[in-house]
Amino acid sequence: MRTWALVTGATAGIGESFTRLLAANNYNVVLVARDLPRLQERASGLEAGYGIETLVLQADLSTDTGCGLVESYIATHEIDVLINNAGFGVNKAFTVSALDAEQSLLDVLVRTPMRLIHVALPGMKARNKGMIINVSSVAGFITGGTYSAAKSYLTVLSESLHTELAGTNVKVSALCPGFTRTEFHQRGRISMKGLPAFMWLNSDKVVSKAWSDALKGKAISVPGWQYKLLTLIMRYAPRPLVRRIGMNVRIKQRRGGLKATVNSKYFGRVIKAFCNPP
């Protein structure tokens, strides 16, 4: 008998990759997103390609109604895997951004995953099985505005729950990818001009690594040698340097253009020299 998994932000990028990985591992999948036609298309593809069952939940997770819809479903159904993936970024400095946009970011990246985790865990603990993967980001290790702050919350919460649930068969892990080829940057109008090719990750490989690390009981999964190095540096570097790097990255993303291109290429060469990858 197949068990069920639920994925938020399931129609594209990392979320869509998770739905295929779960289907390949014989899970039925609940797909959550805002775009109903795309949800239905993805669900049909999973059923045809993997012979599983799917359920579509159309929900805007920035709203109380959308979040409540998914909460209610989890509370009344047995979900063995929860993937908190939905997210977006605000491409403006906090001092000039729209308050509504910042509130929506907080609701999608912090409020909703916190509530879904809180609803899912009692059932998982009672059954003594389950897995929660929270899609965070390496941005949580730097100081890049409210996006970084939100991802830091998700990483720390995952670590705390991982420790709290030690000794049980319920696993909680934070996936902290770097730049991954998805629709994220286009939707957020975030310029990525000049980012070296080796800094881009593939979403299927990111998800495969996250799943493998979660099964091994790791609290944090950081795919890619380049981002393992970066997170190591960020953990031990002086905070003034971390702050400067974080804000520089955000400024370059907002501005784009030649300056960002040149600096990104230089940054890439520095990392490559540090790591000497195969």
Image (cartoon, rainbow, N blue to C red):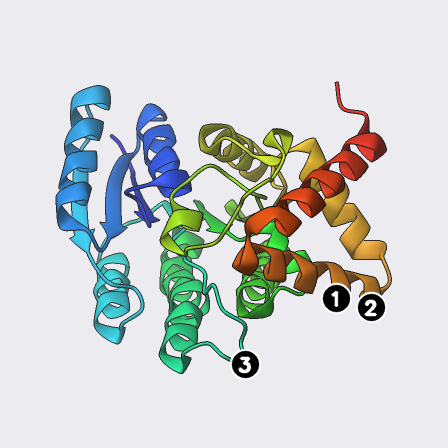
| For residue 217, above or below residue 59 | above
Q: Nearer the viewer, residue 206 or 244?
A: 244
Work out how far the residue at label 2 is from the one at label 3, CA to CA, in angstroms.
20 Å
Whole-percent x and y of residue 213? 59, 36
Hey, what amino acid is under mark 3?
Thr
Task: Determine if residue 65 is in view.
Answer: yes
Residue on which disc 3 sits:
95
Q: Residue furthest top?
A: 278
Q: Residue furthest front?
A: 258
Q: Secondary structure at mark 1?
A: helix
Work out how far the residue at label 3 is from the one at label 1, CA to CA, in angstroms.
17 Å
Q: Which mark is residue 243?
A: 1
Disc with the residue nearer the chain's start (3 vs 1): 3
- Give yes or no for contact between labels 2 and 1 (Cβ–Cβ under 8 Å): yes
Q: Nearer the viewer, residue 22 or 267?
A: 267
Hey, what amino acid is under mark 2?
Pro
Residue at point 27% right, 72% down?
63
Whole-percent x and y of residue 56? 17, 47
Q: Secondary structure at mark 3?
A: loop
Query: In the image, which is nearer the foreground, mark 2 or mark 3?
Result: 3
Residue on which disc 2 sits:
240
Whole-percent x and y of residue 111? 41, 71
Work out how far the residue at label 2 is from the one at label 1, CA to CA, in angstroms.
5 Å
Residue at point 28% right, 58% down?
74
